[in-house]
Image: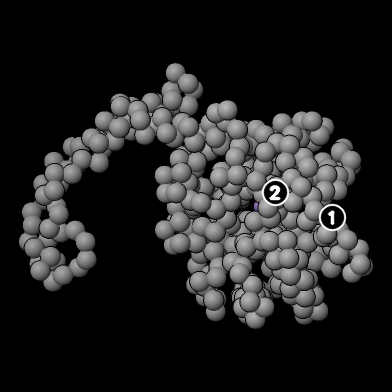
Amino acid sequence: MRYTPKPEHRFSFGLWTVGNIGRDPFGDPVRALRSPVQLVQLLAEVGAWGVNFHDNDLVPIDATPAERDRIVSDFKKALDTHGLVVPMATTNLFTHPAFRDGAFTSNDPKVRAYALQKTMRAIDLGVECGASTYVFWGGREGTETDAGKNPADAGKWFQEAINFLCEYVIDQGYDLRFALEPKPNEPRGDIYLATVGHMLAFIETLDHPQMIGVNPEVAHERMAGLNFTHAVAQAWNAGKLFHIDLNDQNLGRYDQDFRFGSHNIKQAFFLVKFLEDVGYDGSRHFDAHAYRSSDYADVKAFASGCMRTYLILKEKAEQFRQHTEIQDLLAQITADDGAMDRFKGRYSAEKAANLTAYTFDRDELGRRGQPYERLDQLVIELLLGI
Ligand code: GCO
Ligand code: MN
Ligand code: MN
């Protein structure tokens, strides 16, 4: 079947995505809570490859050690039975009231220490279940007012925490990479390290930058009004695209977490095309959830829809590569007669001297238009199936 998900597509979902019970600030849950084992079964039924979790999606925060061990063992059995893997794990540092002012950046040193302890335990749990990527989403790491916290102090606390946890992973001999996930706001008024660009710069200030990449999310860059594919491309060029959160989002709205490709088809297309063109081989994680109006049958339709749309857009990307008119226009757009070859590449004093002496006909350069309207219309028609 043409759009059937297969393990090689690396489609994953968080327990919290298909397990979302539809609570929102205005209304109670609309779907009955399903256990991790039931959710693994649901994901197997729709053909997903991987399942990710926060520590407390799997093990309740108040579980005893014996309960923890039983839950983990049942979960691992379900993974075996259904042939699913755990590519990524993360920590819930936002639900409990202890984290009301952040975790690693809380003003309270006890909360900061507790956040470290909780994360070390969650890392152990993730590794025990097979995770090779560990995500850090600083959902409560921010403020509503800057009156009570110096953002530079908060930045240092964040650095200290990630450095500490890198050393912990090295000390345990774990084969685990960190992926930092930026978001501009929600649930805080403003969250520190708001975009992929902020995160990439932050990573270079840490003690073990080689262990750390990013986990960009479609909705988060869009909430900031940014071009997601550009952010992903910058992460890719930096060798930092360790993971990706796929969903959809309308600009200027609440944090919607819509089904992948359900809102901005064209932007989803350029994203899928980019990931496929460069050969990104990590998880394609759908960090989204079904509409609150859905029942569990519709949750399955939601999950299938995320994967199906990805595969359709992947096929469209292939059609783009095979499309004669599109490729002819691209050849015209990127035409190169080789005249500038002698100025290209690394600097040399000779090149610089030659380039300085060269005379450009800037009016001629300025007369050349680009057929982007024609090209874009062809993309639209390709996407509309004309
Ligand atoms: C959000 C975030 C989260 C994180 C998750 C994993 O907006 O709530 O995207 O879903 O991705 O906590 O770290
Ligand atoms: Mn999100
Ligand atoms: Mn996310």
From the viewer's perspective, tell me whether residue 333 is left or right of residue 315.
left
Q: Which residue is mark 1?
A: 74
Position of residue 220 measured from the top left corner of the image (x, y, whole percent):
61, 50
- Ligand 1: does it lie within 8 Å of the C-beta at label 2? no
The correct choice, above or below, for 12 with respect to 378 in the image is: below
In percent of width and height, residue 129 lies at 73, 61
The residue most toward the top is 386
Residue type pointed to by label 2: Leu
Residue 255, position in %: x, y? 69, 46
Q: Give yes or no for contact between labels 1 and 2 (Cβ–Cβ under 8 Å).
A: no
Circle 1 Cα neighbour tier, 10 Å, few/some/many (<14 / 14–19 / ≥20): some
Seen at 48% across and 58% down, the residue is 235
Residue drawn at 75 percent across, 58 percent down: 54
Q: Is residue 168 above or below residue 370?
A: below
Using the rendered view, name the quadrant where residue 187 is placed: bottom right
Q: In what quadrant of the picture does the C terminus appear?
A: top left
Name the one closer to the observer, 326 or 109. Answer: 326
In depth, the one of 12 and 37 nearer the eye is 37
Q: Amino acid at mark 1?
A: Asp
User: Which is more toward the observer, 210 or 267?
Assistant: 210
Q: Dot 1: what SS? A: helix
The percent position of residue 226, horizontal first and vertical second, equals: 52, 48
Q: Residue at x 26, y 30 (%)?
A: 328
Q: Secondary structure at mark 2?
A: loop
Seen at 51% across and 34% down, the residue is 313
Numbered circle sitting on residue 84: 2
Residue 265, quarter of the rendered image: top right
Label 1 vs 2, first from the N-terminus: 1
